[in-house]
Amino acid sequence: MTEKQNLSQTFAEHFAVLEKKLNGKSSTPQHKARQEAMNRFKEVGFPSIKDEEWKYTSLTPLLKVHFQPVAEVPALAPVEEDIAQYRAGYPAAAELVFLNGAFSAELSKIFALPDNVFAGAMALAMEDNHPAIERHLGKHVKLDDNGFVSLNSAFLSDGLLIDVPDNTQIELPIHVIHYTSSPGEDAVVAHPRKLVVAGRSASVKIIETHAGTAGSSYFTNYVSETVAADNAQVETYLLQHHNEDAFQITNRYAVLGRDTNAKFFSFDFGGRLVRNDFTMVMNGEGGEGTLNGLFMPRGDQHIDNHTLIDHAKPHCDSHELYKGILDGESHGVFSGKIIVRQDAQKTDAKQANNNLLLSKKALVDTKPQLEIFADDVKCTHGATIGRMDELALFYLRSRGIPAREANNVLSYAFASELVEGVSVEGLRNQLDDYIHQRLEESFSQEK
Amino acid sequence: MLEIKNLHASVEGKEILNGIDLTVNAGEVHAIMGPNGSGKSTLAQVLAGHEGFEVTDGSVTYEGKDMLELSAEDRACEGVFLAFQYPVEIPGVSNTYFLRAAVNAQRKYHGEEEYDAVDFLSLVKEKMKIVEMDEKFLNRAVNQGFSGGEKKRNEIFHMAVLNPKLSILDETDSGLDIDALRIVAGGVNKLRSKDNAIVLVTHYQRLLNYIEPDFVHVLYGGKIVKSGGKELALELEDQGYDNIREASDSAVAV
């Protein structure tokens, strides 16, 4: 049996374990959906580098890991000391903590949320037949895209639901911590899930921190759906701080309505093998969507960003900027596809991917793609890969700034555009410090 | 202050400086003139510590220290300043941030307390007056989107803030209109003192009408082929570099 079949088999067994524990709930519609997802997973399986969309990312390291069944992972004790370092530390409307995908009431705190907003456990919302679940959960992701989406859906039992009704504004950000706890010998696989529904003219900012047990190998298979109705304002920030032995696969989908303004930022620092797929659909006239990402792999980390911006309706603007700062023997991937449908006249789509290589052995593959079916559109795209600008370095040093600091200043400057776009001041300052610290670590090593 | 002896330097195996001798004392202004390709900018960059140039022979003593042993940043901290011929654009780094990092690096080098943002701002605002710079340039990214004249003015502004002992101005006058030249030269004159020295590398005599040098040197073929007072500049302006070329080329032939 190949490693791939092996791991698929493992997950099928995990599913069987889960089913046994359902205790009479196996005929619920939710479980029917899970069964369907599991069947799809068995058909679709894991992608291989023979698939065009996966040619730069080999799953071999993941397939070799032995995972223990989700359902057999002992109930997790609240681990405040593990979580503490990831807490926001700046004013937030709520801080919601999820352990291996399940909501932790003990670790979560609500500070200032309007009464009509639901922000919390998806399991609870399912039990209460919350309308957002019925209308949107699993309705936007595509089970067939890759095995990971169907796998997540097969194990879906809890997750994060944020439902912001029409005309409701939440000023402070909601901070979410997705923590994968993997304390034992065998690696844990978690399938966290998120659904955000922003109603008409609603506004919400969400900051998600992804992290896990230090020093252990684990796999976080994340799926997120965001539905932003007409005229809604949504900002989402994903900060990925996994340890450098961890695996993270994310599949995120966002659908924007008429005049909706949505911004999605990703800051990827950790992980051994990270693959992010993001699909943003401009589904109403006059929408504006921003997809920004900073990824900073080092050592032998591998971070792959695949994005698809689908302009389905006219008069929409999309802005996409991904920047990579790569050190060590790391490998970065950017693949950005923009589709402009025949209907989507007056589209204005801008895409850029810029990469800075800090070491001779770092590698980046970048692949911008445009598919345009409308005839009155503005689309620009560009990709660059470069090393530190020696002349700029000399300029700084000739004014007295030591080489190490000069390298740090210039690399930070490369990333700063993305940090400046962050509207939450506390987060911006945190990112500022963290990126400087990461760069300091890079430049304190002799190359 | 600065003593250059028999300085040879090359880039990628090609010799550009071919035995420079030059002594600069505190309080003096030296102008180094010469045709294109004579090695003027190379001399400036070698003195500032550009690692792209290899010093193959000779010595440079600055304030009693072997300057060639010092890194670019240590030279700056010891009071050497180079105003770039082509100031570098640094997107994402504001002018103030850059300057504060530079000033604090130099203060740290001397074991002095670093400036906080507030104290630094008042220092900077004082110095901006020297080159009549608008405050909007403080928060803009270093040289990004600056006009040619603004970039050169910004270099002199940096010089004013860093307060160097030895300033090397590499073609700071090139490409400036007369108003900009007057402001830049005025700035340099305000910074001139009996304790510091200035080396003006220039292509045109025009600058010397605004900044009066004590000595003028002509660089040709990587060597100083003629030195004199400020009248030498006028002579060059009248006669061009042809006489110099002929004289030194025939000397080489002999």
Image (cartoon, coloured by chain):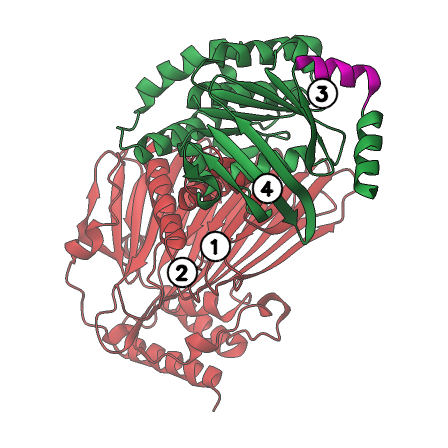
Chain colours: A red, B green
Q: Position of residue A217 (x, y in %)?
A: 32, 71
Q: Position of residue A188 (x, y in %)?
A: 30, 72
Q: Badge 2, how many Cα within 10 Å: few under 14, some, many 20+?
A: many
Where disc 2 sits, the SS reads strand
**What is the CA distance from the residue labelled 1 to the residue labelled 2?**
8 Å
Q: Specify whether disc 3 shares its chain with disc 2.
A: no
Q: Which numbered disc, 4 or 3, marks the residue that appears first in the sequence?
A: 4
Instruction: Please say whether residue A167 is visible from this viewpoint.
Output: no
**Against B83, is A107 above or below?**
below
**What is the CA distance from the residue labelled 3 to the residue labelled 2?**
57 Å
**Against A175, is B236 above or below?**
above
Tell me the residue that label 4 is attached to: B7
Query: Is B235 colored magenta in this rendering?
Result: yes
Q: Give the range drawn in magenta.
A: B230-240
Tell me the residue that label 1 is attached to: A252
Amino acid tagged 1: Arg
Amino acid tagged 3: Gly
Q: Which residue is pictured at 69% across the width and 43% down the height?
A: B16
**Against B177, is B170 above or below?**
below
Tell me the residue that label 3 is attached to: B175
Tell me the residue that label 2 is attached to: A222
